[in-house]
Image (cartoon, coloured by chain):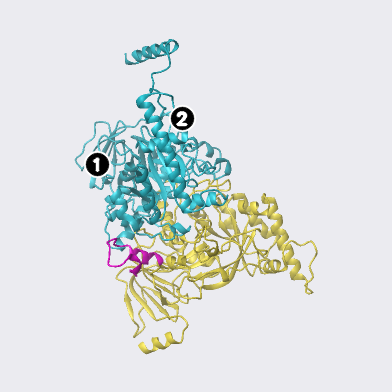
Amino acid sequence: MKRLIASVILGCSSPLAAQTVVITNGTLVLGDGSEPVQGGTVVVRNGRIVAAGTGVSAPAGSEVIDANGKWVTPGIVAGFSRLGLAEVDLGADGSDDTDSGNGPFNAAIDVTPAINPKASTIAVSRADGVTRAVVAPVAGKNIFAGQGAVIDTGDDMDAVLRARAFQFVELGEGGAGIAGGSRATAFVLFRNALREARDLRGRLDGQRRDDVLLTRFDAAALVPVIQGKQLLLVHVERAKDILNVLELRQEFPGLRIALVGASEGWLVADRIAQSGAWVIASALNDLPASFEMLAATQSNIGRMRAAGIKVAIGMIDDNDTRYVRNQRQYAGNLVALGKLPGAAGVSWGEAFAMISSRPAEAVGLGTEIGSLAAGQRGDVVIWSGDPLELSSSPEAVWIDGVRQPLDNHQTKLRDRYRSLERNALPEAYRK
Amino acid sequence: MRRGLGALLAILVVAGCATTPPPKPGSIRINENPYPSTYRPYGGVPTLIRGATIFDGEGGRIDNGSILIADGKVQAVGGADLAGPEGATVIDGQGRYVTPGIIDVHSHLGDYPSPGVQSLSDGNEATSPARPEVWAEHSVWPQDPGFSRALANGGITSLQILPGSANLFGGRSVVLKNVPSRTVQGMKFPGAPYGLKMACGENPKRVYGSKSQMPQTRMGNIAYVRQTWIKAKEYDRKWTKYEKTGGDVPAEDLALDTLRGVLHGKILVHNHCYRADEMAIMIDVAKEFGYKIASFQHGVEAYKIADLLQENGICAALWADWYGFKMESYDGINENIAFVQNAGACTIVHSDDSNGIQRLNQEAAKAVAAGKRAGIDISEATAWTWLSANPAKSLGIFDQTGSLKAGKMADVVLWNGNPFSAYTRPDKVWIDGALLYDSTNPKLRPVSDFELGQPGEGDVK
């Protein structure tokens, strides 16, 4: 067996390889919205979940890890982020690839080459149990930001699970600003862009009209959007903006839309529910931070969920390059609302699903990542305690069945400065 | 009778002015409190909370504890046997926790309020690197809905509003009671000393360097700061000489008045500074000019010089886990707070954020957990010193609030569970003994003027 592992390692460009992992005796969280169960077992083989539950037995001969009652969950999925796109957000230009505002392209942009699997933010997020992230570009000079990816946070060079998983567009206050100052302009730009894409698709000879605004490359990138082959993530916050976006589907029936942000979603919850659209919502927005969020409340998600809307938690514009690890705190805070008179919370199981399976489902990867269902990618975390609780932290993380290192820039600084005693040599010699 | 005498004296003085020559040489004083607090506590009923877990804010913990508040003050804190006066409201605190109200030493509520539009953005007078003449209180918009969120979701009972960090000298801070008012004077914490916001590092050099002005570099930052203190010393000498020996009345200068107040220890310096090396330099600047730094704000690298902070008696107001949003925060670690505490330095959890201020208890919880993982066991009771006693000390108001001791202001939060849990929320909040938030009573949920008639008015937020 040992020899086998060695040969796998040798045959692989990555120093880490998928093993058969069996974790028993866990407080098991499937990530599908169900509540935790005691005494659960997870089996991961060839990088995939084989089985998870209470009646699951370990395959003969496999190495078994006893979780000793600790919590075992699927990895956390960052529902909307810019993870891996920026090392530093301000004043370190070369390290920040979030925004392509000075470039000539928009919808055609594909974030894939900008994602740095070795970004410290990825290692820090991994150490906190985040194993996957939905990564979107930032809109520059056009309401269309470009195409985002779904990545893993593994310690290897192959971060991208699904490139071009979606197109991202700003249609609220931010979109209006980019479009020239009004929502009306933003919607005309939107319609025009889709018109140009439709026209392009219809012309086998590649000829275009002469009144186009988009480059051919950008227009072509929107063809899968109007065909419904590529998901369109739309950032809106204001209740009426949400309705405007949902109505676009009457005009462009092929569109597959998911809403991002949606701080005022609860005001139009019935309409969103009818539409069947996913919402990747900000969890704790409760300030009228802008005029498009006057009705923001932490009960937004609970109310939307109660209305039957499919909701995931995302981090848009909330330090989304790096603080995705806070999603589990946010999810815990939504559970807390259940005890608050007049507020709308969510169950523990649902809160956890909102940072695991729900975001995966929202971007069309619900059968690949986000839960411990058989056949899913082998992303598993053993936690010191309840993962939605502030005192808990990951003790072991697997991605695609590969055990991950949890050390990073921060943990090494921690170890270096744990003591400030003067040593024989300066701190720089402590590694 | 007393009032009558005062009025008589006033008349005599006024009458005297009309006939006598100018005031005695050296007798003119600059008014140090021209915008006095008009805050008056709202009344409350005597209230006894029994059976709760109490963190007193100074590191003490009482299980199955009781607290009696009346007449705006903490009357007594004790065990199960503590009795209240007849007619006192008795609250069963079983399964709940009582703490001092949280004090956030770093807030921009009111000067960067919600909504975050340009018209209301009044936090940085970024027109010169040294603007000690501006006072944050003159920017505070009392209708900022953020105050009510900080109260209801965060259990914040007092907070310091600081100018921003675009400038090396940002201006005076103001300490507020988190009580809604028509005016900022109606929120001002009575008797709280002023603070001076200073900043080192990236922000000043970026803001002015990008305009091709000094400072463009960190050495420019320090040179500008030193030059400004040299001017302040000169100003101080002139006024001190005048006050002692008379002569021509020196010209008054608003900016230098503030700095003079610092040199005399009346105004407390709160220094925005991230990097360890820069904090060490600022400590030397303070020694060079003979002032004291009350606190470093942000101190993302405080853990690298926790010993220096301890030796110099400087508080560090920190985040639990912010990092990497700019270069000077690149070395942020989750153990920062625990390491600073462990070094024996005055440790504070701060927000600098209208969302973070609603969860400072949770930020403290994260810091406790990170410390524990690094082998540093900090009790929850000790950690509460980061949220009330130490903030109060750094603001110069600890004699009045910041812990649950008899005679102090009854700034108290009843939590519906352990406040170090993600599942806990404030249940009730008292400020000076007045019940200003009650989760079970929608009428005790403040609504700012801005939110009246808007979607979501009066909603649970």
Q: Residues within 10 Å of mark 1 (few under 14, many from 20)?
A: many
Chain A, which colour? Answer: yellow
Asked if residue B295 shows in the view, the reply is: yes
Q: Is A280 in front, or is A247?
A: A280
Determine the residue positioned at 74% across, 61% down: A213
Q: Earlier in the sequence, mark 2 or mark 1?
A: 1
Is A411 contained in the magenta span?
yes
**A194 to the left or right of A317:** right
Q: Which residues are magenta?
A: A409-431
Task: Read off the residue under disc 2.
Answer: B252
Chain B, which colour? Answer: cyan
Q: Which mark, by number, is residue B66?
A: 1
- Identify the element where label 2 is drawn: loop
Q: Nearer the viewer, mark 2 or mark 1?
A: 2
Residue B38 placement (x, y as % from top left)? 41, 28
Q: Identify residue type, mark 1.
A: Ser
Above or below, comparing residue B48 to residue B313 in the picture: above
Residue B88 placement (x, y as % from top left)? 28, 33
Residue A105 placement (x, y as % from top left)? 67, 65
**B133 to the left or right of B432:** right
CA gap, disc 2 and disc 1: 53 Å
Q: Which chain does the residue under circle 2 lie in?
A: B
Count how many numbered circles sit on residues in the image.
2
Q: Is B226 in front, or is A259?
A: B226
- Identify the element where label 1 is drawn: strand
Asked if residue B353 shows in the view, the reply is: no
Above or below, comparing residue B310 to residue A258 in the picture: above
* Residue B78, quarter of the rendered image: top left
Q: Quadrant of the N terminus of chain B?
A: top left
